Every structure is written in structure tokens, then in C-alpha cells.
Image: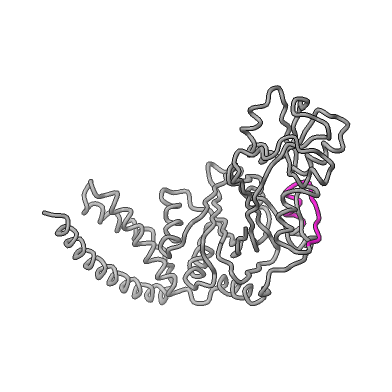
């Protein structure tokens, strides 16, 4: 039998599958009505397990795993449809609508903004790109930024969250679960690292280099080429430059930025020492209040799942059913737990979509951890 005839047969079967799926979803609609009248929840684990057992046995050993995946997807579609029918105007939807109505149409040009580090830090550079006239307050550690926003001392905070060549800023992700905040904007900043030292100092004179651990990771190839040079971690690249400038020693240097060289009176010994010229760090702008500005097209969530096989798959399937692109999935261990994790998701989506709000409302209503971190736009 030739290829076209085989494809024709598949087309016929696809038409039958579509008709049967539509019929099944219509029955799901009727079941949703029965559940509403009886006060039952959408999820019925025992019923799903019963169906999976029956259809996989019918499919046979060769097709068992494929049929399981198929029906898990069908279940997710059915649950999503029933939730949509039963949801109405939930509390989560009302919170989102209120935030949209209370948020100004333009992102602010000024505000009191918390940044980690000192003058010249990359966080400050990101802040200056987001705000035309910010009043910046500096904090030594990332937690200080979260605390300043949480307490109301600062309206906004700027935090690095990931780098294109050195990955996630794990400390920031670990702090996220300890504070209530919302992401209102993000920015990708092109980062160029340089080796800075006092005027007249040569590379051969350097015995110690100071910088933040992320910057050290981003410049690992350059650092590997240096002989007998000690690498020291400090809280910030700008703080490293300031320390070198204020020190009496002439054998130390800092991996920092060219603006910091000008700011602290240092010289650039080696320029562009990062591993990759296309080196970007993504910063988030956080606020205590939920603010959703026009053009917001990225959603960030913090979620946990039950400790059972297929739980994460079921969660991701909720996004897939709506055709939502998942751009980031980060897992962090829960301290004191037995291999349990919190998951951080970035989605290409908007809460202006009723289907997205319904899906998020369904996640909030589940017994697992759900934190809506924000719906925002990312700028470059």
C-alpha cells in the first residue's frame, strides 16, 4: 500500500477521533452539571485510574504507554473544560481584574528603588534603564532588597535572576519563597566584564581577583588562563571595584564594568573578559503590590506538585492544552523535605485571556502551593 493511501486512511480515522472527542467533551459538560448539583469537585482520581487501567489493557502491551499518555492529555482537557464551565467569577479572577483597573497605563518614571550592591552595580544600570528618575537605595545582600520592598521602605526592587552563560542566580530563587512580592517588569541587560586595577598596575602584578560569584562564573575561561592568582568572592562586582580602589594594595584587581572603572578611578587591564560576547543578565523589577501594565505578555508562577509519578507532567499539560509556551522551568529543593521541590515557571501568556485566568484560578484552588508572581512585559 502506498503512502498516500495510508495517509488517506489516517485522515478518515482522525475525522472519527475528532467526532468522538467532541462527543466525549459534550458528556464531560453534562457531568460538570451533575457535579455542580452534587457539590463534587472536578478531579476524580479513582475514576481516572479506572479508565487508564481499562484502556491500557485493551490497547495491549506494545501500545500501553502511548495510550496512557493520550488519556492523561484527554483527562487534562476534560478537567480544564469542566473547570471553565464551573468557575464563574472566582476570587483570583477578581484580584486580577482589580489589579488591571488600578494599574496606571504607563510604567512609572520615578520611584524609590532597592538595589543590591553599591553605585555602579549592574542592578543600578538595569534600574536606570527601567526608571528615568529613580531614587536608589543600596543594600549589601539580595535579601535586603526583598525586605525593603516587603516593609514598604522601597516601592520597587531590582534583582538579577539568570544569566545567559552562567545560569540561574540560585540565591534569589531561594529567597522568593520567603517574601510576598510581584514582578512588574523585567529587563535583559548586556553585561560586559573587565578586569580593573589601580593605575599603572599590569596583569603580571595581580595575585588576587575579587568579584561576585556570577561574574566569576561568566569569566571562567579567562580566569583559568591566569597562573597563581587567587579568586575571591564578594557580594557585588561594583563593591569589588570600590574595595580595590580603596585598598592600599597594588596586587589586587576586580572583575567589574567599565563604568565602575571611571566611577572609582581604576584602569581597565583587560577588557571583555566574559566567556561569551553575547552575555546577558535578566533582571526583575519587583513590587509589594500587584501591578499589571498594558503590554504584559509574560507570566511567572511559583508552584509545587504532589509527590507522585506524572504530577509535573499533569501540571505542564495544563499549559499545553491552552497552547501556552513555557519559556522557563526552574526547580529548587524545599529545605527540610525529602527530595521535594518548588517549581518556578515563566510562560508566554496574558491574564487578558479568560482561558488563562480560568486555568490559573484552577491552580490556585488546588491543594498544592500556588503563587502568582506577576504578569509583566520584558524589555531589552
Residue 352 at least partly seen = yes
Q: Which residues are magenta?
A: 134-148
Looking at the image, which residue is at 69% across and 52% down? 159
Residue 75 counted in the magenta span: no
The image quadrant of residue 3 is: bottom left
In this rendered view, identify the residue nearer to me: 144 or 113: 113
Residue 137 counted in the magenta span: yes
In this rendered view, identify the residue nearer to me: 278 or 151: 278
Report the quarter where the C terminus lies.
Answer: bottom right
* In the rendered image, the vertical position of residue 231 relative to residue 37, given as above or below: above
Q: Is residue 193 left or right of residue 349?
A: right
Residue 334 at least partly seen = no
Looking at the image, which residue is at 81% across and 30% down? 201
Looking at the image, which residue is at 44% across and 61% down? 318
User: How far across and down, in percent of the image, does residue 234 sit?
Assistant: 75, 38
User: How far across and down, in percent of the image, does residue 61 sit?
Assistant: 23, 46
The image quadrant of residue 92 is: bottom right
Amino acid at each position: 500500500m502506498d503512502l498516500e493511501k495510508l495517509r488517506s486512511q489516517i485522515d478518515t480515522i482522525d475525522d472519527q477521533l475528532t467526532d468522538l472527542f467532541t462527543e466525549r467533551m459534550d458528556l464531560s459538560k453534562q457531568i460538570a452539571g451533575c457535579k455542580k448539583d452534587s457539590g463534587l469537585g472536578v478531579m476524580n482520581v479513582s475514576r481516572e485510574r479506572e479508565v487508564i487501567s481499562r484502556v491500557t489493557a485493551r490497547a495491549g502491551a506494545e501500545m500501553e504507554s502511548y495510550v496512557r499518555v493520550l488519556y492523561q492529555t484527554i483527562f487534562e482537557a476534560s478537567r480544564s473544560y469542566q473547570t471553565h464551565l464551573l468557575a464563574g467569577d472566582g476570587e483570583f479572577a477578581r484580584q486580577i481584574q482589580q489589579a488591571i483597573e488600578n494599574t496606571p497605563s504607563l510604567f512609572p518614571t520615578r520611584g524609590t528603588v532597592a538595589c543590591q550592591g553599591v553605585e555602579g552595580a549592574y542592578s543600578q544600570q538595569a534600574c536606570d534603564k527601567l526608571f528615568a528618575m529613580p531614587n536608589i537605595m543600596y543594600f549589601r545582600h539580595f535579601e535586603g532588597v526583598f525586605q525593603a520592598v516587603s516593609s514598604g521602605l522601597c516601592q520597587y526592587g531590582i534583582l538579577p535572576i539568570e544569566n545567559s552563560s552562567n545560569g540561574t542566580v540560585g540565591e534569589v530563587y531561594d529567597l522568593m519563597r520567603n517574601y510576598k512580592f510581584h514582578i512588574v517588569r523585567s529587563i535583559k541587560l548586556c553585561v560586559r566584564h573587565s578586569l580593573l586595577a589601580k593605575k599603572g598596575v599590569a596583569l603580571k602584578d595581580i595575585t588576587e581577583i575579587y568579584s561576585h560569584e556570577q561574574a566569576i562564573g561568566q569569566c571562567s575561561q579567562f580566569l583559568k588562563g591566569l597562573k597563581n592568582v587567587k579568586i575571591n568572592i564578594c557580594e557585588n562586582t561594583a563593591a569589588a571595584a570600590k574595595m580595590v580602589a580603596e585598598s592600599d594594595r597594588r596586587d589586587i584587581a576586580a572583575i567589574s564594568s567599565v563604568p565602575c572603572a571611571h566611577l572609582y578611578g581604576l584602569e581597565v587591564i583587560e577588557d571583555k573578559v566574559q566567556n561569551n560576547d553575547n552575555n546577558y543578565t535578566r533582571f526583575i523589577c519587583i513590587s509589594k503590590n500587584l501591578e499589571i501594565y498594558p503590554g504584559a505578555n509574560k507570566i511567572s508562577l511559583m508552584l509545587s506538585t504532589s509527590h507522585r509519578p506524572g504530577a509535573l507532567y499533569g501540571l505542564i499539560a495544563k499549559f499545553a492544552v491552552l497552547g501556552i509556551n513555557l519559556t522557563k522551568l526552574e526547580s529548587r529543593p524545599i529545605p527540610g523535605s525529602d527530595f521535594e521541590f518548588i517549581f518556578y515557571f515563566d510562560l508566554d501568556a496574558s491574564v487578558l485571556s479568560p482561558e488563562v485566568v480560568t486555568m490559573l484560578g484552577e491552580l490556585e484552588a488546588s491543594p498544592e502551593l500556588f503563587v502568582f508572581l506577576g504578569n509583566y512585559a520584558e524589555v531589552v
